[in-house]
Amino acid sequence: MRRYTYLWLMQLVTGVLIAVLLGIHMVMQHLEDILRFFGVNLNDPASWNSMIERSRQVIWAGIYIALLAVVLYHALNGLRNVILELTPSARTERVVTWAILAFGIIIFVWASYVPIALLSR
Amino acid sequence: MDTQKTEQITFRVRRYDPEKGSNPHFQEFTVPSSRGLTVLDGLIYIKENLDSTIAFRTSCRMAICGSCGMLINNYPHLACHTQIEEFHSNRLTIKPLPNFPIIKDLVVDLIPFFEIHKSVKPYMLRNDSNEMENPTAEFGQSHQTLESFLQFTYCIKCGICVSACPTSASDKLFHGPQALAQCYRYCADNRDAGELERFPVVGTDHGVWHCHLAGACSESCPKGVDPALAIQLLKRRVMSRTLGLGKKEPPASTVRPSAQAKPKLPFPEFTVKQG
């Protein structure tokens, strides 16, 4: 029972975190005019030089790795729920859970390599 | 007094008899209808006058027994609680409740539904078996506590919420809104101490965590119960117990009647079975 309860709780928590982290990304990358209205000037954040400059900061690498983790959890746990709803059985649950867990770890390691590599340049 | 206008209503009833091996098909009947006639009255007219082989469940004819749930014009209703003129149409399509196996025509198999209902232990669970077996006084309960779960006690187990639930349609192991709402009804009762026995049953992938909050159960309930609310409250309760949040009250103890309270009337003789 505890496992299912925590899975559901994490789905809620990651949903909130996605709203926060994706909100930071959207505001910094695509809502520059609004930030400028409030007196914050980012000097063309979508340009190559700005991107390279940000990638050297640990805080930005952390934000993107955290965003990757929460999006992966939220999406893959949702996908697991959909699959288990359509094919309910104990065996399917075991296979689907392990397959999705393995897939999530591979994608996380692979995709988090990019910000880590940029950070160490 | 105005004269009652009689209309001819076409009942398009889905017929299916698995024992005869025929495919499901629709059969049409013409029923004379007047103001106040319910869909169940129409079906009884068909059975008595047109085709005695048509099968449907009915008992109380006053929306209490929960027997006559069926899909009328693609929406689940109690046939006895639904007047023909509500539809403003002279053609009604009547099908058995979805999400249940069909026994014959409009009769569905409710045994799996009742088995799930039983699995959540819908009765008082307490540790003081002596008091339960030989009660000495009433268990104390405030009006506020009663109000917190009263609406969920109005469930008549008709299965309409389960037939309307999209999760029950896709997940055959899902407990369904009826059982989950009844689980909350007993857990919220301050006389009960059975949370630890019920939560492992409902706190699974096919239990309370699988409700998508579509709300179809609450919209369709003929008794005005809100099972979707009960499920959300149950989620909060299971989560609180798992995380150890909130104060867990001990089950209510017995309360002696006050000196001013009127003594209970004795049971009339005719209600007491003489050994």
Image (cartoon, rainbow, N blue to C red):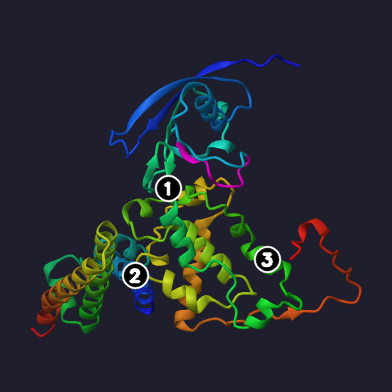
**Subunit ID for the residue under disc 3:** B
Q: Are marks 2 and 3 in contact (CB under 8 Å)?
A: no
Q: Secondary structure at mark 2?
A: helix
Q: Main secondary structure of the magenta part?
A: loop
Same-chain check, marks 2 and 1: no
Which residue is denoted by mark 3 in the rendering?
A: B146
Which residue is denoted by mark 2 in the rendering?
A: A11
Horizontal side of residue A14 vs A111, given as left or right:
right
Residue in the picture at 23% in, 80% down: A62
Residue B144 on image: x %, y % = 70, 67
* Camera-side residue of B118 and A69: B118
**Subunit ID for the residue under disc 1:** B
In the image, which is nearer the foreground, mark 2 or mark 3? Answer: 3
At label 1, which amino acid type do we have? Ser
Which residue is denoted by mark 1 in the rendering?
A: B163
Q: In the displayed structure, would residue A121 be above or below residue B81?
A: below
For label 2, the crowd category at 10 Å Cα-Cα, with few meaning under 14, some 14 to 19 and many 20 or more, is some
Same-chain check, marks 3 and 1: yes
Q: Is residue B225 visible from the viewing direction of this image?
A: yes
For label 3, the crowd category at 10 Å Cα-Cα, with few meaning under 14, some 14 to 19 and many 20 or more, is some
Horizontal side of residue B15 vs B196, given as left or right:
left
Q: Whole-Å distance between the Cαs marked 2 and 3?
A: 33 Å
Q: Is residue A43 visible from the viewing direction of this image?
A: no
At label 2, which amino acid type do we have? Gln
Magenta segment range? B62-71
